Amino acid sequence: MGVSKRLVAVLMAGAAFAVVLPYQGVWAQSDESDTITLDDDSGSDATTTASDGDDGVDASGATKLKRLVIGADSSAADITNTPAAVSTIDSETFKERFAGDVNDAIRSTPGAFTREHAEQPGIVVNIRGMQGMGRVNTMIDGVPQTFRNLSGHGGTFDNMAYVDPNMIVGVDINRGAVPGNDGLGTLSGSANLRTIGIDDVLLPGKDYGGLTILQFGTNGRNFSRMSAAGWMHPLDNEGSVSIMGALSGSNFNNYRNGDGIEYSFDASQDPRSGLFKLDFAPNSDHSLQLGGIWYDNAFKVESADYDWQINNQTYTAKYAYQPGDNIIDLKINAYANITDIKMFSDDGVFAGRDGTNTGLGFDIGNTSILEISDISDIKFNYGAAINSDAFKANDARGANPDGTLIKSGAFMDATLTQGIFGLTAGLRYDAWNLSGAKNFDEPGTGECPADHVGLCDQPSRHGGEWNPKIGATITPKDWLQFYANYTYSMRPPTASEMFYPGGHNFDGTSKPINNNPNLVPERQKGLDIGVNLRGDDIFMPGDTGYMKLGYFRNRISDYITYGFGEDGKVKWVNAPGITTMQGVELEGGYDIGRAFTKLSVTIADTTQPIGEGAGFGNDVGTLPDDFATLDAGMRFFDQKLTLGSRVRYTGDSIQAFFDQKDTMMRPSYTLVDFYGSWKINDNFRAFFSIENALDKSYWTANTGTSDIFSGITNGRGRTIIVGATARF
């Protein structure tokens, strides 16, 4: 079935679901008022309170719906309050149903995927076929992760986020042009990895306490543990102060595939990490949060015969002034991210290729609401940001060029709400400045004058783009909302692309001839059309359900890919013409208390240009056109015991290899998982998961080229994990 027919089939199924259920008269509104906490356009927390008699629309055009407690997934339905393509993975789902597997958790959401390489623990997020070089803003606690390593055939041109899964409590995903400061210079989406906080450590009503998580597993997942402790003290004027810290460590060995054969290369690693957070709120108006997280890991990249040692540090400072009026809801953030890489090799080829990637940033944002009448108001969301991405290597830099990309910009969004209608108009300006080393001549060498300061021939480029957007919502019922958004976005080239030296350049002395200072930014025009549904008492008293169905169509010009330039040299080039990516995304769930089900479906065509030379050693991420996850389970003993099963389908995909005609097909596969959890009491929980329970042999989609030559499939075979969580 062609992509058009597949898209129509999903749209018809979603439309039938949206029409039939309301016709039966069972989508009802809860009788009680409650508060829903969501992410607003600035990427910060916003609170919407719905009460009896409300018209069902807030100032942003989002539906005012009551909080629906869906068993263990109390936050799953909240995505229907946002008139855009968003998904969220909550703590319980991530920790217990996926046993902390970041790749599996993200791949269970529509339109989102990952690059999963067994030798490489870095997290690479793919959204709607786009990944790498800042196309997707992957963050840890709101801090962009910009590290990448181009050296060696185990390297990748993708941004890699290094964080211990034990420290993660959830993931927020935004597909399409990202609103607010998180969208600065980002093309097609964002993923924010949220880490553990004081509320995750302390039991309700406790001022101090601790948290311990232990996991043991088979098939290389030996053991993992995390311990955290925290203290909170209330202050006068509704203020508080809290401090917490956490330590984590894991031991993983190599694994076997579904045929019982050990993976050809060594997937062993022993990550260690630590975290601290200090929250100070002198009163209910002001708050200051300081945090830091560290990650250390060493692992082999046997496919290229060299080892990596990674140290990642992320620091945050967040201030908020929220006096509770309609004029000021101010948030100011500053952050730093430092990633060091060291390389080792027995034969000396890769040895000593050390470097440091440093990211610094600052942003400010505010939200104001102007009330025009009882059914009409205007919400203004505006702000500005600046951040930098700098890489500095030693003399054995290999394929990693020195360079700094500085992005800055400002935005303003205005949303007019009039009864059931909402209209959003926005404009942002993103500017960029890129500088780097075109060659590595020292003063007094080659053609570089002896009195020159620093390396010779370090050109710079700069530019800026106006990126408008327009959106509309119609909310005819409090359980039903239609939305449409049309947005422009832009991604500037990185130093790795513009100043790529070419070849291996092992000793760092030869002149690079493969850079391309004429690269221009990628530009995208994106259309999102969707519907949100959410209600309770649908088929029986006490049940709840939600659905989010959307269609996207993105048109990218000047797509940057790896290929041959006009001079015949392999370099990063702008592909001619327009690259079009489109698809349908469906996410929904239904819960009756004693049983539940969740569904995620993606049917799309996200084919991207694959230039000459792409693939081997220069992995280009490709998203499978079709993938879906069906999750269903039951609860027993007053919902203290949960047992469930998950079916994961991944459609056909390709792996880039030198050029388009030589790309390799990866066949589709279906995996079956089981999981369960038992709440023994308020202090203790136990859980288990069985990944790939049928021990199926398969090729992991979007994994990399090196595994192709191993001669065996690289998908992990049956893996059993048991664990326990204790809070005291």
Image: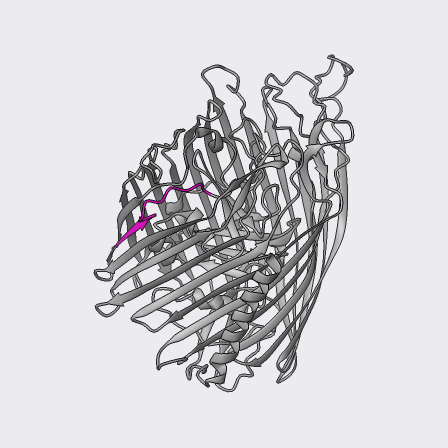
Please tell me which residue is depicted at 43% across the width and 30% down the height of the picture: 711
Residue 436 in the figure: left or right of residue 591: right
For the magenta stretch, what is the residue range? Answer: 687-700
Q: Quadrant of the N terminus?
A: bottom right
Identify whether 380 is placed above or below 660: below
Query: Where residue 534 sits in the image (x, y, percent)?
Result: 48, 74
Residue 319 picture location, percent across and down: 54, 56
Magenta segment: does it hold 278?
no
Confirm whether residue 326 shows in the render. Answer: no
Figure quadrant of the C terminus = bottom left
Left or right of 340? Residue 426 is right
Identify the residue at the far front of this view: 1
- Of residues 139 and 484, the one nearer the viewer is 484
Q: 153 or 297: nearer the eye?
A: 153
Please name the residue shown 28% across and 49% down the image: 212
Q: Please identify the dominant SS of the magenta region.
A: loop
